[in-house]
Amino acid sequence: MGRAAELLGVTPGFLRGLDAAKLFVPQRSAGGHRRYSRYQLRLAQRARDLVDQGTALEAACRIIILEDQLAEAKRINTRLQRRIDTAEQD
């Protein structure tokens, strides 16, 4: 956790707050240390950016979750539209 906090320029408490807000759940090493994926670090950076702009931590996490859900919905929509387009061509 210390290394991740250092990379992002945040405190370990900030990362614990993201965990408590359910933005993501880091994996644990055999020794019990938190291990973050690159994707989780990107989410943490996005949260930090929002907090730096004055957004409350809980609200920042909710925004990020909604942004992620919207992106997934757009991917699904694109995939389904391609299927429709392919079916119409047949």
Image (cartoon, grey):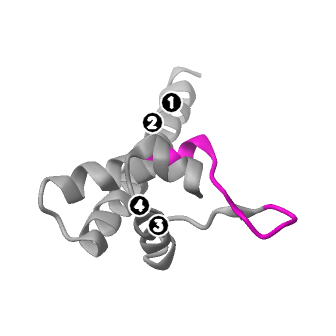
Q: Secondary structure at mark 1?
A: helix
Compared to residue 45, the image places residue 66 above or below, namely below
Question: Of the residues under marks 2 and 4, which one precedes in the sequence?
Answer: 4
- The residue under label 1 is which amino acid type? Arg
The residue that appears at 55% across and 25% down in the rendered structure is: 86
Q: Which residue is mark 2?
A: 78
Question: Of the residues under marks 3 and 4, which one precedes in the sequence?
Answer: 4
Q: Nearer the viewer, mark 2 or mark 1?
A: 2
Question: Of the residues under marks 2 and 3, which one precedes in the sequence?
Answer: 3
Q: Secondary structure at mark 3?
A: loop
Question: Of the residues under marks 3 and 1, which one precedes in the sequence?
Answer: 3
Residue at the farthest left position: 54
The residue that appears at 60% across and 67% down in the rendered structure is: 25
Q: Secondary structure at mark 4?
A: loop
Q: Which residue is mark 1?
A: 82
CA separation in Å, label 3 and label 4: 16 Å
Q: Secondary structure at mark 2?
A: helix
Q: Is residue 10 in view from this perspective? A: yes
Q: Nearer the viewer, residue 6 or 21?
A: 6
- The residue under label 3 is which amino acid type? Leu
Residue at the farthest top position: 89
The answer to which quarter of the image holds residue 78 is: top left
Q: Which mark, residue 23?
A: 3
Q: How many marks?
A: 4
- The residue under label 4 is which amino acid type? Thr
